[in-house]
Each structure stands twice: as C-alpha cells, then as structure tokens.
Image (spheres, grey):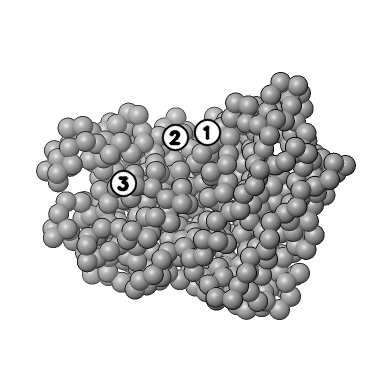
Amino acid sequence: MRILGAGAATCVTGPALAGESQPVIEIDPAPRFALSPYLYMQFMEPLGVTDGSVDAAWDFASDRWREDVVGITQELAPTLMRWGGCFCSYYRWKEGVGPMSARRPMLNQLWGGIYMNQVGTHEFVDFCRRVGADPLIVVNFESDGRKYWAVSPKGDIRSGDAKEAGEWVDYCNSPSNSLRQQHGVKDPYNVRLWQIGNETSYDEGIDVDTAAKKTVEFAKAMRQADPAVEIIGWGDSGWAPRMAEIAGEQLQYIAFHNGLGPGGEGSPLHGIEYRRDPDKTWTYLMRACQAQQEKIDDMRQQVAKYHILLALTECHFGLPGRNRCEVLSTWAAGVANARVLNVHERNGDLLKIATLADFCGTRWQNNAIMIPVPGGKSFMMPVAMVMSLYRRHSGRQAVGVARTPDGLDATASRTGDRIFLHVVNTHRTRSVKSVFQIDGRRITGGRAYWFDLEPEFEVFEYHPECTFPKESVLDSSLAWTFPAASVSAVELMTGSA
C-alpha cells in the first residue's frame, strides 16, 4: 500500500504520446445546453463533535478563518458554497450576527457539543468572497417538521418561521437594513440563492402538501424582502411532483440528496476490507456512477412536466464506517468520483447545482478538504482533486461525445473555439491511446492536465507534487495516451476546417 504523506511514496510518471493510428475520441462541437458552473458546489455545515468542520477551520485566537483552509479552498476553487445541512433545522440566524461577545452559544442537537456561533452570516459570506464562491443559504424551515429539533433539550425554541426567513434575506440583501448597518456592514451581501427545507421528507413530521404550502409562505416572505432571490424547494422521496404543483411558481429549483453506494452485502467498501482485493474494490467503486444516473433519472421523470431545474445540494459516498471509511482517501475513489462528475455534466440540461463532498472536516473521509488539528496544512482529498480539475478546465456549453475508445468515460464542453474534455480511464491497469477528432473543425493545438496515481494510493496529508495535476502540451500528432486509472482534462484549440 502506498500512502501519500508516508514519506516514501512516489508518483507515477506521465503519459507517453500516442502513435498516429489510434482509436478516436470524436466530438460533435454543436452546443447542446449551458453547462452550469455550480456543478462544482461545496457545502459547509457546523458538525460539532462528530466532525470538526467549521470549528476546525476557524482560528479562535485571531477570530478569523485559518489561512491554510482559505488557501487550499482557493485551489479547490468552488463556484458555490452552501450554508446548510440538518444544522439549519435548529439554527437561529440572529444568534450568529453582530459582535462576537454578544453572540449566543447553542446546543448542536444532531452533531453534538456547543456551537459558539463564531461563524455566522458575515463570516460565511466573507469566506465565500475570499475563495471566489457565490453563497447559498438554507433557512430554518420550521425545523423541517421535526418536533425533537423544534425545542432543544434545554427548552430553547429552535424552530424558525417564514417571518424569520424573510428577515434573514432582508439582512443580507437590503441596502438599507438597519441591523446589518449597526453591525458595521454598510453594503449588502447580495445572497441570491436560498434553499427552503433540508431533507424535509426524510421524517414523518410533515407531509408533502403541508410542506409545499409552507414553502409558498416562506418564498413570499423572502421575495418581499428581495424579489430577485432564486429559491430552491425540497423535493426528494417522491415529493417533487406535488411540490412543483403547489409551489412551483415560487421555485427555480427542486432539491434532492443522494448517498452514493455501492455498499451493502458483499461490498469491500468498508473498514479495511477494501485493501484485501484491489480488483474487487475497483469494480465496486466504478459502479457508483450507475447509481447516480439512476437517481437523476428518477428525479428527471418526476419534474418532466414542470419547468423547474434540479439542485443536488448534498451528495457523497455513503458507505459503512463513515467516520473512518478510508477507502475514500484512495485515488481509486477519486476516479469513481470523476465518473460521477461526468454523470452530472451529461445531465446538465436540467441539473444546475451539484456537489460530491461535505467540504471540510477532521474525520469524515467524504470531506473535500481535511484539516489537521491542532495545526498543520489542510489538503484536498481525491474527490476535491477531481472537482478542482474539472472546475478549472470546463467550457460554458456542453457538446456531444460521439464515440470513445473502450474504457474511456468522456464528456465535453466548449467556450468559443476552445473544446474541453473530461476523460476517465476506467481500466485499473491498462492505458488507452487515442487521437482527437472534432466534426467540422480543425484542431490547432492542445494541452492535457491529468492525475495518474496508483489506484491504491492513499491521501493523508498535503503533497503538492501528487495532489495537483500534471500538465503537458500536445505535440503535432495531437494524440494522447491516457494512463491506467487516470482522470484527465484536455483543452483543444480549434479553427475552421
């Protein structure tokens, strides 16, 4: 087992250029639909004692974000950051604004411990601005119908109503909001994306009709504060059609979540079982993209009659042994996540917001960024490595991939005369040579960016020589060899044929 951070690990060398007579990746350059930059979202949730997350990312001595967390997140380059999760079902936003000395600590009912509210609205938006991400906020939707969160064990009322949600929008977006100005912030934050409800259907506390009617109430209160906001409603567990029927006029997106497998009986993806048979582990990991496509197919069918977009606001591998599911630190998991990203891009006509990780923390291997505590340099996990690669090398319009060599999973996009390819070699031990062909256009040059770590390689600390992609200019043959178990982004410059 090679472990990134163990000191003796080495990286696999780069690919050789392919010969002239090779299989072809053929691209149809006609634009198909706009490819949303928000397919590379992250979401931030204070996870208490369960996983350090927000607490670990905050420098309590200096009352600011840890610089190493900011720096590595800038490398990750998320386009959208979500303040949300189950935490928002008992979060009262007014407790987290204003001077630190006046903020009220709260019991983190699900994740354990006391949250000091050191990170609130201002700090969250500040972080988004520092890393170049747009903010998305989830409001307290009457505790999502969960009575056991609506009142804390200490007797605090933790349920938020539509009025409170509207006041939050006003605080963030109104140029004249007096409370924000009292807190020393003159200019509005201009938070455009808001979500009503988080996993509301995952409990029996509220039915879909009631939730949809309350969604209308919340949306109207929020739009009264700012008519320009875009609102996401909850629609998982078969709720999407009814939510669209009742509240559709108020919503731009329907949200759903997904925990990717494949776990279950016979799966090696738990504990240390995955180390025993690398081939079996690889096979199971490569199936995850199928499960994701099936989930999206179901959501597409549910909203087919309605003019409403999809938002996958939480998604990650949901495997046994969540706290230390170490298989997710392997490069093989990075390859599997890249295949899921390709699924998202293929569904980008309807899927406009999506993520594949829990952003940051100290324990969970499904985080994008791991934070060493009490100190050290934060680093990207394999899922973040591929998200960063795709994010930095993507076009604005999706285009078609007409054919690929066996074993290559490829998507393509375009900005002007530049074509972007995202290519996953699904062969664990075999490279694939290919030339490129773009229908009706001439390729004038290109550059490749890629990861080709060994599948069993495990990422446990910051090593830029392996956790950032290699790159090379394509030579005049305009051909390339995709290494075994690699994830690549290829940029092709084109002109008229």
Q: Which residue is mark 1?
A: 308
Numbered disc in front, either 1 or 3: 3
| Label 3 environment density (alpha carbons within 10 Å; few <14, some 14–19, many ≥20) | many
Q: Which mark is residue 92?
A: none
Element on which disc 1 rests: loop
Instruction: State which mark lies toward you, 2 or 3.
Output: 3
Q: Residue at x 72, y 72 (%)?
A: 278
Judging from the image, what secondary structure is the residue with disc 3 in? helix
- Residue 5's place in the image compared with 345, above or below, is below
- Along the viewing direction, whichever of 443 and 77 lies nearer the viewer: 443
Q: Which residue is mark 2?
A: 251
Between discs 1 and 3, the one toward the N terminus: 3
Residue marked by disc 3? 125
Above or below, 57 against 393 in this view is: below
The amino acid at mark 3 is Val
Residue furthest out toward the front: 476
Q: Which quadrant would residue 25 be assigned to in this image?
A: top right
Q: Earlier in the sequence, mark 1 or mark 2?
A: 2
Residue type of the residue flagged with mark 2: Leu
For the residue pair 365 and 222, the one nearer the viewer reads as: 365
